[in-house]
Image (cartoon, rainbow, N blue to C red):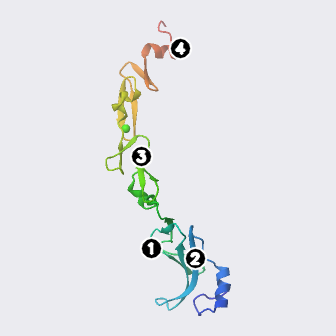
Amino acid sequence: MYNLFSFKPSSHNLDLLYNQISPPAVANAVVNTEYEVNRRLQRYVMVATYTCMGGFKLRDPLNTQLFCRSMVWGADVWPDCIAEDDLCEIDNGGCAHYCTPQGKNRYACSCQEGFNLASDAKTCKDANECAIDNGGCEQECFNTFGSFFCSCRDGFAPKDFACIGEFVQAELLGVSQAS
Ligand SMILES: [Ca+2]
């Protein structure tokens, strides 16, 4: 086994080493591997520098490299190539819930069921389902954050969106009112 850091490798050695520990693939990127002098460590280290393919760009232009230490490739932050025109790739486009790319440098936010898009077109606010047709509830409608529920007045029991009177409940349970 070669000691990676104790010598300046010849191109032949570099080929041998490269075959042993080729750097990991990063999606939509090409990689160039070479030895560089690390002045802090006072030795040569193997460095893989990634370049994004056409139509892609680095998520963070400062994170382009992986370093080989003890035969393992790593970095504090790994290089990452994202679509050039996909603003949703960065911080979800600022959307609270969903971000949908819509062509070059355009995107739209949308919300999960039970929420409506706020006036800033990014955040999502609770939809008050009860405000429209009483939420479809027969009697009481209670709005909750992200949802709602139906309820019934005294003497009635909820069944889906409807309310069943006590007499009907007893019949459903097979209880005779006469007994
Ligand atoms: Ca709600």
Mark 4 vs ligand 1: CB under 8 Å? Answer: no
CA gap, disc 4 and disc 2: 75 Å
Judge the density around disc 2: few (<14), some (14-19), many (≥20) Cα neighbours within 10 Å: some
Quickly name the residue at label 3.
111
Inspect the image, locate mark 1, and give the three-letter code of the amino acid beneath it. Pro
Which quadrant holds residue 9?
A: bottom right
Q: Disc 4 or disc 2, which is closer to the eye?
A: 2
Question: At 67% across and 90% down in the image, what residue appears?
Answer: 12
Instruction: Reply above or below: 26 against 96.
Output: below
Left or right: where does residue 35 sit relative to residue 177? right
Question: At 41% across and 46% down in the image, what residue appears?
Answer: 111
Residue 143 location (% of width, % of height): 35, 35
Quick one: SS at disc 4? loop
- Do the residues under discs 1 and 2 have CB atoms within 8 angstroms? no
CA gap, disc 1 and disc 2: 15 Å
Observer-nearest residue: 162 or 128? Answer: 128
CA gap, disc 3 and disc 2: 38 Å
User: Which residue extends farthest top?
Assistant: 178
Quickly name the residue at label 1.
61
Mark 1 vs ligand 1: CB under 8 Å? Answer: no
Which numbered circle lies on residue 31? 2
Q: Disc 3 or disc 4, which is closer to the eye?
A: 3
Quickly name the residue at label 4.
174
Question: At 50% across and 65% down in the image, what residue appears?
Answer: 82
Earlier in the chain: of badge 1 and badge 2, it is 2
CA gap, disc 1 and disc 4: 72 Å
Residue 131 location (% of width, % of height): 33, 32
Observer-nearest residue: 177 or 126? Answer: 126
Left or right: where does residue 34 sit relative to residue 97? right
* Ligand 1's quadrant: top left
Instruction: Reply above or below: 61 against 114.
Output: below
Quick one: SS at disc 2? strand
